[in-house]
Amino acid sequence: MTRYQQIFRTIYSVDFVAVAALLVGCFFPMTWELEMPAVFWMKQAIEYLLYAAFYFGNVHFLFPKLANKKYGFLYFVILCLFIYLLPIFLRWIRNITDLYAALDKVYAAVGQKHYSSDHWDTTIVIAISLIVVTLSYLSAVAKKMQRNQLAYETLERERVSAELSFLKAQINPHFFFNTLHTIYALMDTDQPAAKSSIYNLSHMMRYVLYDTRNDRTSLSKEIGFIEDYIALMRVRIADDVQIIVDKQVSMPDMEIVPMLLLPFIENAFKHGISALQPSYIFIGISMTETGLKFEVRNSLFEELGKQLDDDQGIGIANTRRRLDLLYPGKYNLQIERDSFAKEYSITLTLMK
């Protein structure tokens, strides 16, 4: 349960507390030794039904419709009128039913004196009205906060889904077309490599088209997709580029967000390889006691430094937003740039 959900559940209990308090207040006189007259219970029913009607009317109608900049003053006036008019109305009820005379008879029958007065009853009604207004306002605010939070989370999920679709769209035309050109060139020079590339490409296309439809996929499928991507990239780069993939043997499987790891590897191939200088890419995937550890290290070239920071900054920011929404409080992302060692590294830990 998230922190927001805990807050909402706590404040939402105000409804239950309010209803319970109204029921206790209405029927509490039943615990008295005196047998109250029918007009008293009629007054109790009218009074507490009005409290309940205003409570839920404020929560579900008045606050949602009027608690805004346009009608805020009208809303305040209605609250004040309720607190002002309810005691007057109940005093009228007491007068027309001759409630005090009926109560005097009940108390006199047991040898007691009835001490209630209009002033005392009015004070009690105003106090209860203030409590009802306050509790209904808190409940209405809590419900509004929850609606806003749910709307925000829905928009975030839609945005993340759109980002994933955009990422898939980027891979589909750009990467696939370039790979097809590479395979076409290999057909005359290295047919076994061309066949292997077509096989890897078909695996990637199947994964992108079918396995990324759901919110989660298995880690083994995600790793298989990464391995196919790396195999295709090996065909397109020079032989002297070092690509090291360190994958834990017999690694347990787990569910993961599809294509969450690819942007880090893409950036490594895009910015960590030079046609003129020795370069390398290291990719490490392992499972620790706390969860999945994913690491990417690549060569850092100063002439590409600004472009790397700009491109990585946007990509990392988007990935962070996905992680914040999909793995709230369950991930750790460390990014380091070592100018002395000329290395750029990213370490992502996804907790179980």
Image (cartoon, rainbow, N blue to C red):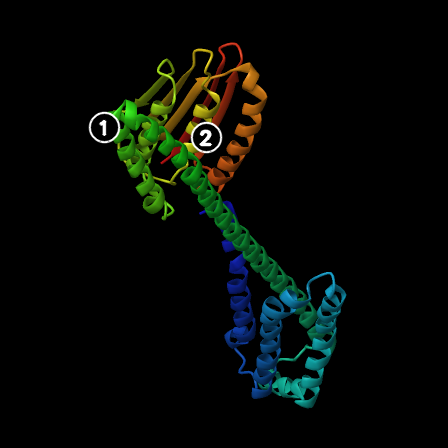
Q: Residues within 10 Å of mark 1 (few under 14, many from 20)?
A: few
Residue 71, visible in the rendered structure: yes
Residue 290, visible in the rendered structure: no
What amino acid type should be assigned to the residue bearing mark 1?
Ser
Figure quadrant of the C terminus: top left
Residue at the disc numbered 2? 332
> Quick check: 248 above or below 180?
above
> Quick check: 135 above or below 191?
below
Q: Nearer the viewer, residue 328 or 239?
A: 239
**Closer to the N terminus: mark 1 or mark 2?**
1
Q: Do callouts 1 and 2 mark residues in contact (Cβ within 8 Å)?
A: no
Q: Residue at x 46, y 27 (%)?
A: 267
Q: Position of residue 274 (x, y in %)?
A: 46, 16
Q: Residue at x 50, y 35 (%)?
A: 320
On screen, residue 323 versus residue 197, left or right, reads right
Residue at the disc numbered 1? 250
Picture mark count: 2
**Secondary structure at numbered mark 1:** loop
Please state which of the two labelled residues, at mark 1 or mark 2, is closer to the viewer. 1
On screen, residue 161 versus residue 183, left or right, reads right
Q: Nearer the viewer, residue 18 or 225?
A: 225
Q: Quadrant of residue 233?
A: top left
Q: Position of residue 199 (x, y in %)?
A: 26, 34
Residue closest to the far front: 188
Q: Position of residue 343 (x, y in %)?
A: 48, 15
Q: Position of residue 107 (x, y in %)?
A: 61, 82
What amino acid type should be assigned to the residue bearing mark 2?
Asn
